[in-house]
Amino acid sequence: MGHSALSGTRVLLGVCAGIAAYKAVEVCRSLVDLGCQVTVAMTADAQNFVGPMTFSALSGRPVLTSIFDPNEPLAHTRLAGELDLIVVAPATADFIAKYRAGIADNGLLATLAASSAPVVIAPAMHSQMWENPATQENVAVLQSRGVLKVGPDTGLLAGGDVGIGRLADPVRIVDVCVDILSGTDRGVEGNSLSLEGIKVLVTSGGTREPIDPVRFIGNRSSGKQGTEIALQVCLMGGTATLITTLVPQIQGLFSTSIGDRLTVVEVETAQEMAEAVFGEIDQADIVIMTAAVADFRPARVLDHKYKKSSGPPNILLEPTVDILDRIGHDHRDDQVIVGFCAETENLENQARLKLVSKQADLIVANDVSKPQVGFGYDTNEVLLVTQDGHYQVPLTTKEEIARAVLSKAAEIYRNKTIKER
Ligand SMILES: Cc1cc2nc3c(=O)[nH]c(=O)nc-3n(C[C@H](O)[C@H](O)[C@H](O)COP(=O)(O)O)c2cc1C
């Protein structure tokens, strides 16, 4: 029952030692059903979870279980030379660290070290292992080398915890493989969408509007989505200027491999953010406004601490400058302006109203009344509203939301610049 376009394509399925190894059986089965010639490489520890017999029976090929195979001593170099794709599912924290370092002490790692085929990894592990800075940096470095990543997803983990770390749905993993093998990689989750040569201006965090030297009016924005967008811009080969109120919080999140792709500008108030955006906008191709900017600020800032004994203060507020509105109405035709909106009802209508009134190219709308969506969470679910239509991005990590937003913004940018030529 082979999918004709994929018949005869050669795929190495790497299986590492995680609980989710049993789901690799489904990935193997689906790829075989699609007509791929699948060879499975299991790490030694993975064989504690699933037996090689299952994979050899499904794939109709011997399973690479060690680098020292008496039947074929150089299987790893032969395979490396003939593969169209390597997919590792599940990819453990241990495997990711070794692969990043170029270690080649098992059949899977040795094949990877010797191959130039596209690589997809589907990490799966406990949330804390995933969020460990070493794992995060290892994954970021692999992505900057062009490795594609699917997942991990958020949900119930082995052991009963809920959080990020679940293996992406095998159907999605197979879909990504099919896209790559058939040359239609859409690049939403992977690194194949290049932002090479594109300059992106991103704002993040919540502004603080001072009342007196110790008090301010602020908001709940965690800045996670904006930080993730700036990071993904760099990993996708572009350059990012991040104007943020959160400089201390983002220290250490950007690995040294990102180098000079990122410029950070620290601001505190809506006025400072506006001035920084207006100062930088001429250099940008795409502007993404994720920051939660105060709509109002105290009309007068006291130069001394307001005394409690003076009773409840009367704080007169005045509007701040509407940055999105200003740049939406005043930017070059080849620039793409992206705004965010958080709503609790009528998501699409509200987003479309904002798109039109601010003259933006893309509005990313989230329904913050839903669980796990928006402020402070590591996950989000958004509706991308453009002048041509709307696209739902289901509940996923802020990292994948960032890629989906960048993918759409880059598509609009390319369409604009093609028209310009
Ligand atoms: C029951 C059990 C479940 C495990 N699940 C995972 C997992 O889901 N993800 C992970 O990264 N490590 C997991 N580990 C730890 C790895 O098995 C361990 O780091 C192993 O050495 C990885 O080997 P490999 O990367 O060569 O496959 C688990 C360990 C045990 C004992």
Image (tube, rainbow, N blue to C red):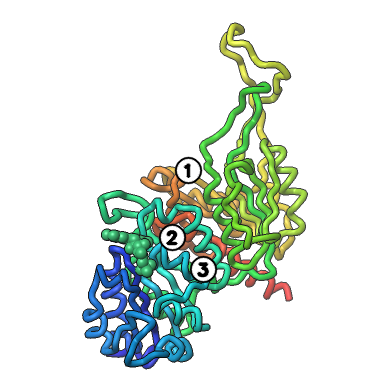
Neighbor class of circle 1 (other Cα within 10 Å; few <14, some 14-19, many 20+) is some
Quote the CA–CA distance across marks 3 and 2: 30 Å
Question: Which dot, 1 or 3, sits closer to the camera?
Answer: 3
Give residue 395's mark.
none
* Element marked by disc 1: loop
Q: Earlier in the sequence, mark 2 or mark 1?
A: 1
Amino acid type indicated by mark 3 = Arg
Neighbor class of circle 3 (other Cα within 10 Å; few <14, some 14-19, many 20+) is some
Residue 379 relative to residue 238: left or right: left
Q: Earlier in the sequence, mark 1 or mark 3?
A: 3
| Residue pictured at 71% horizontal, 22% vertical | 300
Residue 317 position by quadrant: top right
- As displayed, is residue 216 above or below residue 270? above
- In the rendered image, which residue does mark 2 sit on? 393
Amino acid type indicated by mark 1 = Phe
Residue 249, position as x, y percentages in the image: 58, 43
- As displayed, is residue 171 above or below residue 393? below
Amino acid type indicated by mark 2 = Val
Residue 299, position as x, y percentages in the image: 69, 25
Residue 386 position by quadrant: bottom right
* Element marked by disc 3: helix
Quote the CA–CA distance across marks 2 and 1: 17 Å
Nearer the observer, 390 or 139: 139
* Element marked by disc 2: strand
- In the rendered image, which residue does mark 3 sit on? 100
- In the rendered image, which residue does mark 1 sit on? 375
Q: Considering the image in quadrants, where does the C terminus appear?
A: bottom right
Q: Is residue 264 visible?
A: yes
Q: Quadrant of ligand 1?
A: bottom left
Residue 172 relative to residue 196: left or right: left
- As displayed, is residue 270 above or below residue 177? above
Residue 335, position as x, y percentages in the image: 69, 62
